[in-house]
Amino acid sequence: MASNDKGFLNFLKEVKREFKRITWPSQEEVKKALTAVVVICTIYMVLIAVSDLLFENLLTNFLLNI
């Protein structure tokens, strides 16, 4: 049981050591990435909404004419 405790403690020490090696992005980089994600998601939502409206109208008109 003691070897498992040492193994777990070593694991935690390694995790702490790895966290110190992480290079976190700057606040400016995070802002740029967030802006890009928001813009792309907005464009995607608009495209989906427009295509949904088009297909809804096409199918409605097609089914009403049958």
Image (cartoon, helix red, strand yellow):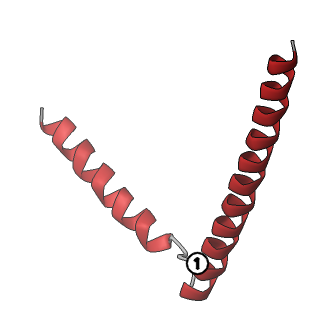
Q: On the rendered structure, is 56 left or right of 10?
A: right
Give the amino acid at mark 1. Answer: Val
**Residue at the spot x=71%, y=48% of the render?**
49
**Residue at the spot x=80%, y=20% of the render?**
64
Residue 5: image location, x then y, percent: 17, 42
Element marked by disc 1: helix
Give 56 or 33, whichever is nearer the viewer.
56
Q: Based on the displayed image, in which of its 4 quarters is residue 33 positioned?
A: bottom right
Give 7 or 21, whichever is nearer the viewer.
21
Query: What residue occupies the far top of the structure in this picture?
Result: 66
Query: What residue occupies the far front of the structure in this picture?
Result: 65
Q: On the rendered structure, is 22 left or right of 7?
A: right
**Residue at the spot x=77%, y=27% of the render?**
60
Query: What residue occupies the far bottom of the structure in this picture?
Result: 28
Give 41 or 51, whichever is nearer the viewer.
51
Compared to 4, does 45 lie above or below? Answer: below
Residue with the mark numbered 1? 30
Q: Quadrant of the C terminus?
A: top right
Query: What residue occupies the far left of the structure in this picture?
Result: 1
Residue 48: image location, x then y, percent: 74, 46
Determine crowd level at label 1: few under 14, some 14-19, many 20+ residues with C-alpha closer than 10 A: few
Compared to 4, does 40 lie above or below? Answer: below
Task: State how many labels appear.
Answer: 1
Residue 16: image location, x then y, percent: 34, 64
Residue 40: image location, x then y, percent: 72, 62
Q: Based on the displayed image, in which of its 4 quarters is residue 1 positioned?
A: top left
**Residue at the spot x=86%, y=22% of the render?**
62
